[in-house]
Image: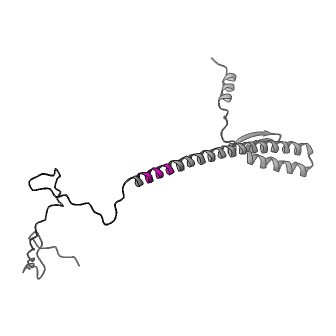
């Protein structure tokens, strides 16, 4: 069975954050005046405030100590910002390269399309394809489509008969099912 000391040592070692975004990470700073918790920017502001308070109270040692703590987190934040900027520049460069490659490919496709269009003979306006007339009795091998068949003329429709009125309903028409239509409620 392990001792609790070794377990706590392992626990602390495994839970240590590795890298990540330091700019937004929350730190616990153990300063001379107790714990200060927050992002690096918040810790810098807190230590600068503590530095001003110590200067106003006349405590030069604490003032210097707070100034050094603020400077440490300022350097840490500046280094993290440089890394973020370098990473952003790298991403932008990769995006520019990808875009340039896409542009090159698009230009090559356009040139290839233009070349194939130039190779094909252009149909001059006014010159149409002649109709091929097959001699009677020979099959051309083509399938006749419904558009090609002539349509028979339509018969004209007979006029509609007027509605017959039901003498029971008092002028209203009969319902389509033969029963009387329901009356509207007033």
Colour scheme in use: one colour
Q: Nearer the viewer, residue 125 or 143?
A: 125
Tell me: 161 left or right of 127. left
Q: Residue furthest top?
A: 1
Q: Tell me which segment is drawn in magenta.
A: 106-116
Tell me: 122 left or right of 164. right
Provide residue 65's location: percent of width, then percent of height. Answer: 86, 42
Q: Nearer the viewer, residue 96 or 57?
A: 96
Q: Nearer the viewer, residue 106 or 32?
A: 106
Provide residue 17's location: percent of width, then percent of height. Answer: 66, 35
Provide residue 11's location: percent of width, then percent of height. Answer: 65, 28
Residue 151 belongs to magenta span = no
Q: Quadrant of the N terminus?
A: top right
Q: Is residue 60 visible?
A: yes
Q: Nearer the viewer, residue 145 or 107?
A: 107
Q: Main secondary structure of the magenta part?
A: helix
Using the rendered view, name the quadrant where residue 173 is placed: bottom left
Q: Residue at x 17, y 76 (%)?
A: 183
* Relative height, residue 2 to residue 167 (above, below): above
Q: How many marks?
A: 0
* Relative height, residue 87 to residue 2 (above, below): below
* Relative height, residue 16 to residue 122 (above, below): above
Provide residue 33's location: percent of width, then percent of height. Answer: 82, 42
Residue 114 belongs to magenta span = yes
Q: Quadrant of the C terminus?
A: bottom left
* Relative height, residue 161 to residue 51 (above, below): below
Tell me: 94 left or right of 43. left
Q: Residue at x 68, y 29 (%)?
A: 12
Q: Is residue 38 visible?
A: no
Q: Residue at x 86, y 50 (%)?
A: 53
């Amino acid at each position: 069975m392990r001792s609790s000391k070794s377990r706590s040592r392992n626990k602390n070692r495994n839970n240590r954050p590795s890298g990540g975004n330091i700019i937004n990470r929350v730190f616990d700073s153990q300063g001379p005046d107790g714990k200060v918790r927050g992002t690096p920017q918040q810790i810098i502001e807190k230590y600068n405030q503590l530095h001003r308070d110590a200067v106003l109270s006349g405590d030069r040692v604490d003032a210097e100590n707070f100034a050094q703590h603020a400077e440490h987190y300022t350097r840490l934040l500046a280094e993290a910002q440089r890394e973020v900027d370098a990473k952003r520049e790298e991403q932008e460069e990769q995006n520019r390269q990808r875009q340039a490659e896409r542009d090159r490919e698009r230009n090559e496709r356009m040139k290839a399309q233009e070349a194939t269009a130039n190779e094909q003979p252009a149909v001059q306006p006014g010159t149409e394809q002649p109709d091929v007339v097959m001699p009677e009795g020979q099959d051309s091998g083509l399938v006749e489509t419904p558009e090609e068949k002539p349509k028979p003329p339509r018969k004209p429709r007979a006029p509609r008969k007027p509605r017959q009125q039901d003498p029971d309903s008092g002028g209203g028409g009969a319902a389509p099912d033969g029963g009387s239509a329901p009356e509207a409620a007033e």
